[in-house]
Amino acid sequence: MSWLFASVLFASSFAPSVLAAQTPSGAAGAARQGDALPAWEAELKRRHEELIQTNGPGTDAALRTRLLNMVVQDQEARGFKDGTPKDKKNLQVATNLNEIDAVLTEQLKDIVAKQGWPTIALVGIEASNAAMLILTHSRDHAWQLSLLPQLEQLADSGKIDGSSLALVIDKELVSEGKLQRYGSQFKLITGGMAMYAVEDPGGLDARRSRVFLPPMDVYKKTLEEIYHLKATNQIVMATPPAKPAEAK
């Protein structure tokens, strides 16, 4: 069940992220042999499986394979393989990460222009989420923003996984200096990681549940396991982008 994203913003310009393992691991949810799943996890799993069954495995096998190969490139460039860090002590990020992201962005643009956004019905849920991860890491923010209305409509109608879209929405809100919606974005600070401020903090877990995301306490533990940093209770405000200097 690939509903869990982990993303931390480092110095606002470097954002390694990974589609985490199918189920929570370690402190966030160690193997529970013979134990029942927590209620929140059982409910998300039920709804997620229902989403897959409703849409089917996908009809375009060639495009599914292409997208899955693209996301392997994306993740290996960020130091991850099969959902876990290749080096658990020191995250190895490609020196040409920007170039890799640019190439993958152009490939995704070509796919969307010719075949529309890769929905679950078209390519299956894993490849559909792979497309969203490529979009998440794109530096073309104008293109990201232009797609959001369509993607939110697809998520609302159950044609794509809402958890994969939540990260894109939060990243765009933070980049504009606004409150994030789902609490996915954290910033590296002295002593650990701090969450960027969210809209309506009291309703955060309810919003996360609606888009197939786990409670914040589980998400924070997963971040800690991936990045080996403490997810603190500190809240930081996003910084609005600098306005271009006016011509004199």
Image (cartoon, grey):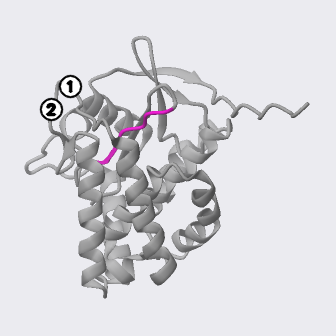
Amino acid at circle 2: Asp
Alpha-carbon span between mark 2 and mark 1: 6 Å
Give whichever of 126, 231 is nearer the camera.
126
User: Is residue 26 visible from the viewing direction of this image?
Assistant: yes
From this viewpoint, is residue 133 visible? no
Q: Residue at x 52, y 30 (%)?
A: 12
Q: Nearer the viewer, residue 157 or 86?
A: 86
Mark 2–mark 1 CB contact (< 8 Å): yes
Return the residue found at the far left. Answer: 33
Q: Quadrant of the C terminus?
A: top right
Residue at 39% x, 57% y: name it.
103
Q: Is residue 215 magenta?
A: no
Image coordinates of residue 102 in percent, x first then y, are 43, 53
Q: Residue at x 80, y 31 (%)?
A: 245
Q: Quadrant of residue 42?
A: bottom left
The extreme front residue here reads 248
Q: Which residues are magenta?
A: 13-19
Q: Is residue 153 left or right of residue 211?
A: right
Residue at the spot of label 2: 87
The amino acid type of the residue labelled 1 equals Asn
Per the rendering, the mark at residue 90 is: 1
Element class at badge 1:
loop
Q: Measured along the vertical axis of the image, is residue 237 above or below residue 66?
A: above
Quadrant of the snapshot with the N terminus? bottom left
